[in-house]
Image: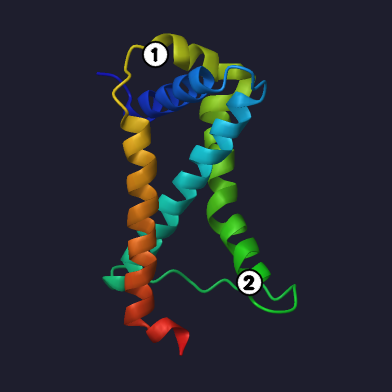
Amino acid sequence: MRNPYYILWAEAFCRYKNSHKDDKDWAIKVFYMYTFINAINLATLMIWLRILDIWIPPEFEINLFPGTLLDKVLTFFLLFWLPCIVINFFFVMRKKRYNLIISKYEKYQNKYAVYYGFSSILFGFATIMIYGFLNNFGF
């Protein structure tokens, strides 16, 4: 049984590397892109746990900048993106492990990474809209 986590990473690396042959920073760009998608999935999971009253996470708010947009972006970065960066770094990027992952899983080219990325973004957007409607968009 192959690990679906590594299949997605290998496919994403291979697709990006093959379509951007002149790009020298292809590994770090794929890392940031799929780490952001993982952060969206983590945020979506937390929102659904809140919507279904399964678990309500404690409120964490940063009031560092004037206004609210930069504070919310910083909060998203600290709560969701930073943990995904640390986890994905140790499992994928440390000591250029992505080369081993690519060599082991490169024959799995079924567009799973593309489907995973687009479905995560669409489901995350739909979740934010549903949560907004349920809470009257904070008004």
Q: Which mark is residue 69?
A: 2
Residue 127: % across, % down: 34, 64
Indicate whether 92 appears above or below 49. above
Q: Tag 2 or tag 1, which sits nearer the N-term? A: 2
Instruction: For mark 2, give the secondary structure.
Output: helix
Q: Is residue 25 left or right of residue 133?
A: right
Between 44 and 30, which is closer to the camera in this rendering?
30
Tell me the quarter of the image containing the N terminus.
top left
According to the picture, the residue beneath numbered tag 1 turns out to be 106
Q: Residues within 10 Å of mark 1 (few under 14, many from 20)?
A: some
Residue 23: % across, % down: 64, 22
Q: Amino acid at mark 2?
A: Leu
Residue 64 appears in which quarter of the rendering? bottom right
Residue 132: % across, % down: 38, 76
Between 86 and 12, which is closer to the camera in this rendering?
12
Between 60 and 72, which is closer to the camera in this rendering?
72
Residue at x-position 49% and y-position 38%: 34
Indicate whether 110 appears above or below 120. above
Q: Are marks 1 and 2 in contact (CB under 8 Å)?
A: no
Residue at x-position 32% and y-position 64%: 48
